[in-house]
Amino acid sequence: MLTGIKLRLYPNQTQVGQLWQMFGNDRFVWNKMLDMMNERYKNNTDLPFLSKFKLNYLLKPLKKEYPFLKNSDSSSLQLVNEFLNQSWKNFFKDKTGTVGKPRFHSRRYLKPSYTGKSIVKIAGSRYLYLPKLGYIKTSKTGVLKDVKIKRYTVSLEPTGKYYLSIQAEVKELEKLKKTGKRVGIDVGVADLAILSTGLKYPSFDASYFEKQSRIWQSKYSRRRHQAYLLCEQDKNQKVLNPRSLDSFSNWQRACKLKARYQKKVANKRKDYLHKLTTHLVRQYDVIAIEDLKVKNLQKNHCLAKAIANASWSMFRQMLEYKCERYGKELIAVNPQNTSRICSKCGFNSGAKPLEIREWTCPICQVHHDRDINAAVNILHKAMPAL
């Protein structure tokens, strides 16, 4: 079974320089190979894109011409060719016109990263051995025991932190014990998950960090605009050594702080969802949810931000892979009429505005909480599939 593992890296100053060299080498090889393929495409060559094996054959003369490429892990350059080859294949296979030709990678806008498939060795509880980098300090490596590493990616986040993302093959995990319980879940905005048992789990709240993120986003935009004006002023006045955007430390500080607050919000949201979904998978053998089209729902501009903050898609994705991993069952049902039908007698009372959170069935006189009633109906719809 394949899984993803992410570790924090703590490179020293020498290794930071090596990492930037490897990031640049990947970008350089991509642009060189793409330039050659664009020429073949422009000249109407029968096969404008070469196979990844032919591209790898061209790496040897390229390294002789540009010796700095030898500072990179050779497997990372081979993977660059593989990704480029796949991009051309996607372009030619696409019939709708939505997939464009591969583009050149820009130093300014591309996320600094490189992917390799060489052997990564565990050198201690907090050290790994990476090709070309040597021994590098990392977060706890206990999670890498008894796993087979297939690929790894070293990346630099906008926060200024380095991470190692690993695609690893692990043994099948032990299935969780059966509890014999079933539950229907209705998702909402004020409450993220409403269970058919009557329990409600509130939506994620990180208002403080979101406020700080907005403040620093505003400062970042203002400082960048001011720095851009000063750079243009130097160009117009033909200053001997004109300033560049990278020379403004105030703008760079705002850039990092903005990214850190945004990352803080994302990490806290993911942590909350992980804890909630793990709890649900441990408690119930069968979980029924609505098969919602979240992209369509986000077209409502009044609710788009609240729906995005609730992270319904991420909530469902986590439930899906955790149910599969731990031997539980997840059933997605059609959400039609789940909030209109009385869960007691089945009477359809019609559409109701969002302001109405409680209602009484005119037939059986049962008083319903709108969300709990919907969760019960979701569970009833899933019963025939069992």
Image (tube, grey):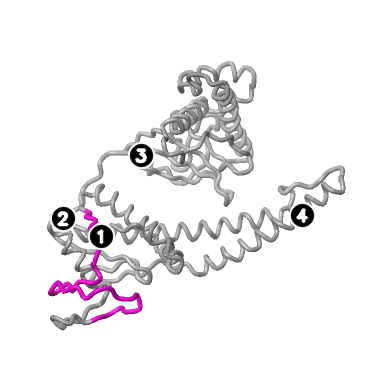
- The amino acid on which the numbered mark 3 sits, given as a three-letter code, is Lys
**Dots 3, 4 in contact, CB < 8 A:** no
Q: Name the residue under label 1.
A: 289
> Counting residues from the N terminus, which is met first, the one under dot 4 or under dot 2?
2
Residue in the image at 21% along x and 55% along y: 331
- The amino acid on which the numbered mark 2 sits, given as a three-letter code, is Lys
> Counting residues from the N terminus, which is met first, the one under dot 3 or under dot 4?
3
- The amino acid on which the numbered mark 1 sits, given as a three-letter code, is Ile
Residue in the image at 52% along x and 19% along y: 45
Q: Where is 61 relative to 192, above or below? A: above
> Counting residues from the N terminus, which is met first, the one under dot 4 or under dot 1?
4
**Dots 3, 2 in contact, CB < 8 A:** no
Give the side of residue 318 with respect to residue 138, left or right: left
Q: Mark 1 or mark 2, which is nearer to you?
A: 1
> Counting residues from the N terminus, which is met first, the one under dot 3 or under dot 2?
3
User: Within 10 angstroms of label 4, few (less than 14), some, or many (20 or more) residues?
Assistant: few
Q: Mark 4 points at which residue?
A: 229
Q: Where is 276 relative to 23, above or below? A: below
User: Within 10 angstroms of label 3, few (less than 14), some, or many (20 or more) residues?
Assistant: few
Q: Is residue 348 magenta?
A: yes
Q: Main secondary structure of the magenta part?
A: loop
Specify the label residue 178 is tagged with.
2
> Counting residues from the N terminus, which is met first, the one under dot 3 or under dot 1?
3
Residue in the image at 29% along x and 39% along y: 1
Start and end of the magenta stretch?
A: 330-359
- Disc 4 from disc 2: Cα separation: 65 Å
Residue 316: x, y in percent? 32, 56
- Disc 4 from disc 1: Cα separation: 52 Å
Q: Mark 4 or mark 2, which is nearer to you?
A: 4
Q: Nearer the viewer, residue 33 or 342?
A: 342
Q: Name the residue under label 3.
A: 145
- Residue 152, quarter of picture: top left
